[in-house]
């Protein structure tokens, strides 16, 4: 049974599943940010490149397992499998939305 998520979050994971960095970046607001591995990435162009670089480095897939809303944030637990120590690992993808787009994503 598919997990129900807000449209921008569902779009993010759909783009992730088919390795479409352009569509993934379009899910973000113009001033959107990603925090991953201790680094911040700002804006759709940089987010697109972040996704390409991560895919080239880790050859990863993400399978959403559960979603919940907490304090105005959408938290998706995703099983990340790829070329890295400890794979697979379940990570929190913490989204904040604004105006039908992703304003921020923190992966932890």
Image (spheres, rainbow, N blue to C red):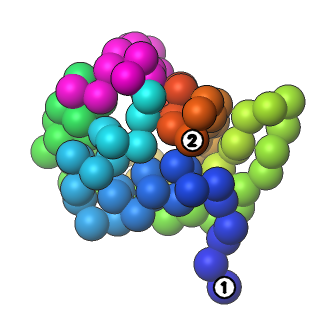
Can residue 42 be seen here? yes
- Image quarter in which the C terminus is found: top right
Write down the residue under mark 2: 100
39 part of magenta stretch:
yes
Label 2 packing within 10 angstroms: few (<14), some (14-19), many (20+): few
Residue range in magenta is 30-45
Q: Residue at x 85, y 30 (%)?
A: 71
Based on the displayed image, in which of its 4 quarters is residue 38 positioned? Answer: top left
Give above or below for 7 relative to 49.
below
Magenta stretch, main secondary structure class: strand
**What element does badge 1 sit on?**
loop
Q: Position of residue 33 (x, y in %)?
A: 44, 21
Q: Residue at x 70, y 42 (%)?
A: 74
Sequence order check, earlier mark of 2 and 1: 1
Based on the displayed image, in which of its 4 quarters is residue 26 positioned? Answer: top left
Write down the residue under mark 1: 1
Can you tell which of label 2 and label 1 is closer to the viewer?
2
Label 1 packing within 10 angstroms: few (<14), some (14-19), many (20+): few
45 left or right of 42?
Answer: left
Q: Position of residue 66 (x, y in %)?
A: 70, 61
85 part of magenta stretch:
no
Give above or below for 17 relative to 73.
below
Can residue 89 be seen here? no
Identify the residue at the far right of this view.
Answer: 71
Based on the displayed image, in which of its 4 quarters is residue 27 positioned? Answer: top left
Identify the residue at the far bottom of this view.
Answer: 1
Q: Position of residue 49 (x, y in %)?
A: 18, 31
- Image quarter in which the N terminus is found: bottom right
Q: Residue at x 23, y 56 (%)?
A: 20
6 left or right of 87?
Answer: right
């Amino acid at each position: 049974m598919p997990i129900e998520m807000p449209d921008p979050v569902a779009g993010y994971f759909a783009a992730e599943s088919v390795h479409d960095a352009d569509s993934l970046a379009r899910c973000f607001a113009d001033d959107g940010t990603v925090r991953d591995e201790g680094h911040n990435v700002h804006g759709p162009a940089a987010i697109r490149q972040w996704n390409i670089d991560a895919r080239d480095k880790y050859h990863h897939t993400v399978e959403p397992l559960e979603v919940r809303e907490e304090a105005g944030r959408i938290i998706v637990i995703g099983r990340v499998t790829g070329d890295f120590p400890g794979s697979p690992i379940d990570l929190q993808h913490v989204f904040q939305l604004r105006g039908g787009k992703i304003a921020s994503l923190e992966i932890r």
